[in-house]
Image: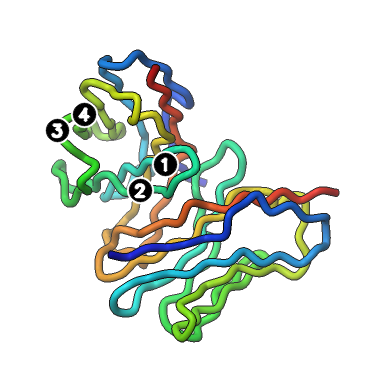
Amino acid sequence: GDSVTQMEGPVTLSEEAFLTINCTYTATGYPSLFWYVQYPGEGLQLLLKATKADDKGSNKGFEATYRKETTSFHLEKGSVQVSDSAVYFCALAGGSYIPTFGRGTSLIVHP
Amino acid sequence: EPEVTQTPSHQVTQMGQEVILRCVPISNHLYFYWYRQILGQKVEFLVSFYNNEISEKSEIFDDQFSVERPDGSNFTLKIRSTKLEDSAMYFCASSLLAEWENEQFFGPGTRLTVL
């Protein structure tokens, strides 16, 4: 079945550092790929998405490129802020509207 | 901005007891979902609900679970006889349409602890 694997956290960075959170997936067909973010005390929010190979999703300075050849959708940001501290979830959705999520990666950004 | 709300934020119960987790979806949304996340594990789909009936459910959603939309605003998840392994964060979500391209909006979750 479909699955998503994310790097283990927590990821701890200093403000203005470069962020990469790895995500790889296994799926039949051509799924859509997503990153969700959960800030403390809040629900999951859609951060960005990509619906076909080589698409780049971007939002709030975050980017991720749908790489079919490596079945990856790594999340990157050039310069993180303290306010980016949250849990980030990679997810995919294939033919069904029900998404498959990863475990989430906690990001802690220090001033 | 409209949001999904969930109550309570934390529920502690004894094994074997019934619990009801409550959610208020976004008012014009038509599709409703429950997910759970056991600590350190993946977010798992439990059930989706549309037009007052279950449209899809996972193998986790066995006879101990039920969902209901008792009025025009609430969406509830009932666990009939809780087990230790039901301890998890439970997320409610809603969407206007069923297709995944139509974003699901999540609530902040209810942490259920079964002792």
Q: Residues within 10 Å of mark 1 (few under 14, many from 20)?
A: many
Mark 1 vs 4, N-terminal side:
1
Mark 3 vs 4, N-terminal side:
3
Find disc 3 in the rendering and name its residue.
B63
Q: Is residue B19 above or below residue B73?
A: above
User: Which SS class for mark 4?
Assistant: loop
Q: Is residue A64 above or below residue A21?
A: below
Mark 3 vs 2, N-terminal side:
2
What chain letter is assigned to the residue under label 1?
Answer: B
Q: Residues within 10 Å of mark 3 (few under 14, many from 20)?
A: few
Measure the alpha-carbon separation of dots 1 and 4. Answer: 25 Å
Which residue corresponds to the image point at 75% horizontal and 70% vertical from the top-left? Answer: A78
Measure the alpha-carbon separation of dots 3 and 4. Answer: 19 Å
Single out the mark in the foreground, 1 or 4: 1
Single out the mark in the foreground, 4 or 2: 2
Which residue corresponds to the image point at 42% horizontal and 32% vertical from the top-left? Answer: B6
> What kind of residue is marked 4?
Pro
Please tell me if label 3 and label 2 are on a single chain: yes
Front residue of A46/B13: it is B13
Which residue corresponds to the image point at 35% horizontal and 44% vertical from the top-left? Answer: B35
Q: Pointer 1 and pointer 2: residues touching (CB < 8 Å)? A: yes
Mark 3 vs 1, N-terminal side:
1
User: Which SS class for mark 1?
Assistant: strand
Where in the figure is residue B100, as x and y percent of width and height? 33, 64
Find disc 2 in the rendering and name its residue.
B44
User: Which SS class for mark 3?
Assistant: loop
Q: Pointer 4 and pointer 2: residues touching (CB < 8 Å)? A: no
What chain letter is assigned to the residue under label 4?
Answer: B
Measure the alpha-carbon separation of dots 1 and 2. Answer: 6 Å
> What kind of residue is marked 3?
Asp
